[in-house]
C-alpha cells in the first residue's frame, strides 16, 4: 500500500464542482465522484480521496492535486494509463507520483496559483466564452494593472470571501497578482494570482471588482478601500466561474518519493 499524488486536469463546464455530493445527490456530476469511480475500478478500498481544493461549479483546473492510498503492483505510468482509461473525456490524470504516507494535498500546500481570463467584446462568442468572461463595456487595462498591484502582500481579504471553515481567519498573503495580454489577436486578458491560501470565492470577487474599476463603475482606489474595510463592506458581485482555472499547487521539497510516472 502506497500513497499516490496525481495532478488532474478538467474542464469544469459539465461538473457541479469538484466535491462529491451527499446522499440523495447522485444525479449531480462531480470531479471527485467520477475520479473515485475510476479508482474503484482498480480495486481502491478507500472512502474518499484527499484534494488540494474544492473548485466551484463550472471552474476548470490544470493543476488540481489529489491523493489516495492504493495497493498497486505496477508502475506510476501504468497507473496513469489505467485511471485515464476509466475517466470521461473532460477529466485527465497528467502526472502520478508516490509521496510520503502522511502527505495531504491541502494542508501541505505552500501556495496556489489561479488564472482568470476575460475578453472585451460587445457581441457573444460561444467558443471563447467557454473559458473566458466576456466583458462589456471594455475595461481600461491601466486601471486593471493598478488595482492588481494593490493586492500584493498580507491583507485581510474579508470583503472578498469567507474562510473554508467556520470561524477561520481571513488574512492571506498574496505573492503576486497581475494582468497580462494572453492573446493579442483576440484581445484576451488573463489575471494571475498566487497566494498562500484563498478564501471561498475570493478570486472571482477580486476579478469582479477589478473589472468594475476598469469600467469606471468604481473609483481607482476602490480595491484599497475594500481591503481596509474588511467585514464592514463585503463585495456582493462575483465574476462567473467559467473564466477561472486552478493552475498549480506548490509543495515543499521532500514530499515526493518518486519522480512523476516512474
Image (cartoon, helix red, strand yellow):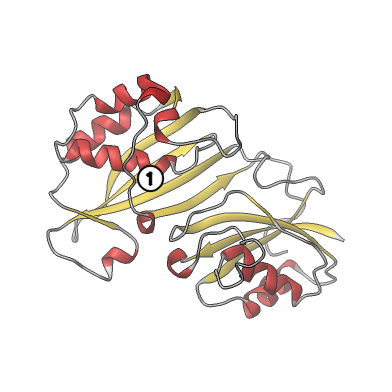
Residue 60: x and y, percent? 45, 59
Residue 99: x and y, percent? 76, 51
Residue 225: x and y, percent? 30, 22
Q: Quadrant of the N terminus?
A: bottom right
Q: Is 86 or 232 nearer to us in this picture?
A: 232
Residue at disc 1, secondary structure: helix
The residue positioned 58% from the left and 49% from the top of the image is 53
Q: Is 173 or 222 nearer to us in this picture?
A: 222
Q: In the picture, residue 206 is in which quadrant?
A: top left
Can you name the residue that lies furthest to the right here? 1
The answer to whether residue 188 is left or right of residue 55 is: left
Q: In the picture, residue 215 is in which quadrant?
A: top left
Q: In the picture, residue 59 is in which quadrant?
A: bottom left
Is 112 above or below relative to 234? below
Is 64 above or below relative to 176? below
Is 101 above or below relative to 16? above
The residue positioned 49% from the left and 58% from the top of the image is 61
Can you name the residue that lies furthest to the top here? 228
The answer to whether residue 144 is left or right of residue 112 is: left
Can you name the residue that lies furthest to the bottom here? 85
Q: Is 67 or 233 nearer to us in this picture?
A: 233
The residue positioned 25% from the left and 35% from the top of the image is 145
- Mark 1 — residue? 204
Q: Is residue 109 visible?
A: yes
Q: Is residue 157 visible?
A: no
Mark 1 is surrounded, within 10 Å at the Cα level, by few (under 14), some (14 to 19) or many (20 or more) other residues, namely: many
Residue 262: x and y, percent? 73, 64
The residue positioned 28% from the left and 37% from the top of the image is 209
Q: Is 157 or 39 nearer to us in this picture?
A: 157
Amino acid at each position: 500500500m502506497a500513497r499516490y499524488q496525481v495532478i488532474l486536469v478538467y474542464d469544469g463546464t459539465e461538473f457541479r464542482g469538484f466535491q462529491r455530493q451527499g446522499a440523495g445527490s447522485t444525479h449531480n456530476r462531480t470531479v471527485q465522484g467520477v475520479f473515485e469511480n475510476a479508482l474503484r475500478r482498480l480495486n481502491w478500498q478507500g472512502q474518499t480521496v484527499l484534494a488540494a481544493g474544492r473548485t466551484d461549479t463550472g471552474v476548470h483546473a490544470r493543476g488540481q492535486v489529489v491523493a489516495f492510498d492504493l495497493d498497486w503492483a505496477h508502475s506510476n505510468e501504468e497507473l496513469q494509463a489505467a485511471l485515464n482509461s476509466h475517466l470521461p473525456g473532460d477529466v485527465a490524470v497528467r502526472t502520478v507520483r508516490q509521496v510520503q504516507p502522511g502527505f495531504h494535498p491541502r494542508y501541505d500546500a505552500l501556495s496556489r496559483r489561479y488564472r482568470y481570463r476575460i475578453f472585451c467584446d460587445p457581441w457573444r462568442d460561444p467558443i471563447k466564452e467557454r473559458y473566458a468572461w466576456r466583458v462589456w463595456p471594455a475595461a481600461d487595462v491601466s486601471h486593471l494593472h493598478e488595482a492588481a498591484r494593490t493586492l500584493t502582500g498580507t491583507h485581510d481579504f474579508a470583503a472578498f470571501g469567507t474562510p473554508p471553515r467556520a470561524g477561520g481567519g481571513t488574512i492571506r498573503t498574496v505573492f503576486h497578482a497581475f494582468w497580462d495580454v494572453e492573446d493579442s489577436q483576440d484581445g484576451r486578458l488573463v489575471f494571475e494570482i498566487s497566494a498562500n491560501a484563498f478564501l471561498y470565492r475570493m478570486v472571482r470577487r477580486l476579478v469582479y471588482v477589478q473589472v468594475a474599476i476598469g469600467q469606471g463603475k468604481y473609483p481607482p482606489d476602490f480595491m484599497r478601500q475594500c481591503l481596509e474595510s474588511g467585514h464592514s463592506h463585503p463585495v456582493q458581485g462575483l465574476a462567473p466561474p467559467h473564466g477561472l482555472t486552478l493552475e498549480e499547487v506548490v509543495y515543499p521539497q521532500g514530499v515526493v518519493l518518486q519522480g512523476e510516472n516512474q
